[in-house]
Amino acid sequence: MKNSPFHSDTALPSLSRRDFLWQSGGGLGGVALASMFSGEGKASAASDAMLPFPKAKRVVQFFMSGAASHLDLFDFKPELIRMDGKPSDFGEPVEAFQNGLGPWLKPMWDFKAYGASGKMLSEPVSSLGAVVDDISFIHNMVSKSGVHSAATLLQATGFLIPGFPGAGCWMSYGLGSLNDNLPTFVVLPDHRGFGSNGIKNWDSAFLPSQHSGTIIYPGTDAPIADLFAHKVGSYVRGDAEAAAHRTLGALNRMHSASREGDQRLDSRIRSYELAAKMQMAAPEALDLKAEPEHALRLYGLERGAQTWDKEINAQEETYHFAQKCLAARRLLERGVRFIQIWSGNDNGFPRRNWDSHEDLRRDHGPLSTGMARGCAAFIQDLKQRGLLEDTIVLWTTEFGRMPSSQGGKGRDHNPFVFTNWLCGGGIRGGMTHGESDQWGYKPLDRKNPTQVYDVHATILHLLGLDHTKLTFRHNGIDRRLTDVHGHVITPLLA
């Protein structure tokens, strides 16, 4: 310590580096400094990745689990209407996921032009017509897998295999929090359960665990699991609980001080601290009943709207999806950085997801109607509140569906091309980037498709982060969200 600027000849208690960090900085500052001083897992300085003049602060990702059909929603193909029912011929051998190489199948619904851009949208997603001039569509997205689990991970984490942080984790790590009383990354799953891979899609993996997504179920009696003590513990007083938290914190720090370089406990301490703060902040943020009637009506959540049959239908889908959208708006207003909203679960039959092998009209109809109503209301709401200009909205799914039929009424997996769309936060509206071929089978320009790395690179760029420099060293490799790929899609930038 002789060469340390902190050295003094005056006798001082012997402090380990971890003790010094906690006693001098404490809290999150101590965690951050400890991270900088640790060896393996050393993070690159956030300033290295920062770009000047970011356009956006927040991101909302809508994820359609099961593979939504671009052909029946957003990517209008007149050739499929002309050739409907005729034997499909792709001009090359095709390896289908199942047996979905039947005759050409026209779109399940009629398309109409909307907005000044004249964008063609199908009937179930017609609600998006009100905001279509704010949206940019990407019709030449490609996936590296036609398997749900791998393709979902690719869209969610940038990798085909588990063990990598979700995109929201990277943005939490790179940008930090806008509100220390709420999570930086929130996940709103389908009310029926998780999509493919479950929590692997939003787990922090090798990043510090406080960057993992926090699961919230809006509109339920307990939106955040275990946030409050069970009712059998009602005898515990607030001052006693606070004292217990202080004691636990002291014990945790003592334990941590003797285990230098191990960030796991630091992350857990941070999680406990956040949970305590959320007990005050989260109930207010998730109180949808506090919204005025006109706001609820915009989302289709007006009083008494919950009147559907037991069978799946558009009204039920609208209600549940809109709840997540409205909760997301409230969370964005209060400083949540990244929100992921899921539609569709992975629980088999009857279909409650977008994996429409058997009957696309039956499955996509209610899901699409509810999704479009919620998304349109969400975008309009952000816009009127001045939030859309610095909030990126991303709509995605793991891959598309084939232009040929499966069993007459369904469509098989199509990893060769599908659609994403974005709006807000520095994205040009009312345009299309990239095209699929006349069938919607592959990109029209097969040499220059758009990949998820490009979408992630573009979003990070708009947030003021260089995707090539936002790295974390793990197992001797400087890992990043975009792996070794990705280009900013400059035509999308406003």
Image (tube, rainbow, N blue to C red):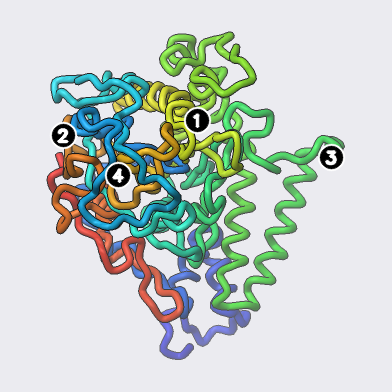
Label 4 SS: strand
> Looking at this view, is 410 or 53 the one in front?
410
Q: Choose mark 4 or mark 2, whichever is in front.
A: 4
Amino acid identity at mark 1: Lys
Query: Looking at the rendered structure, which numbered label has been put on residue 418?
Result: 4
**Can you tell which quarter of the image residue 55 is in?**
top left
Which mark sits nearer the N-terminus, 2 or 1? 1
Which mark sits nearer the N-terminus, 4 or 1? 1
Query: Distance of mark 3 from mark 1, alpha carbons?
Result: 30 Å
Q: Choose mark 3 or mark 4, whichever is in front.
A: 4
Query: Distance of mark 4 from mark 2, alpha carbons?
Result: 16 Å
Task: Please name the residue that numbered disc 2 is placed on.
Answer: 431
Q: How many marks?
A: 4
Q: Quadrant of the C terminus?
A: top left
Which residue is located at x 35 percent, y 61 percent? 481
Q: Please give left or right for residue 231 compared with residue 182 in the image.
A: right
Which mark sits nearer the N-terminus, 2 or 3? 3
Task: Please name the residue that numbered disc 3 is placed on.
Answer: 233
Residue 63 position within the rendered picture, expressed as x and y whole percent measured from the top left: 42, 41
Label 2 SS: strand
> Looking at this view, is 132 or 218 the one in front?
132
Task: Please name the residue that numbered disc 1 is placed on.
Answer: 324
Query: Distance of mark 4 from mark 1, alpha carbons?
Result: 25 Å
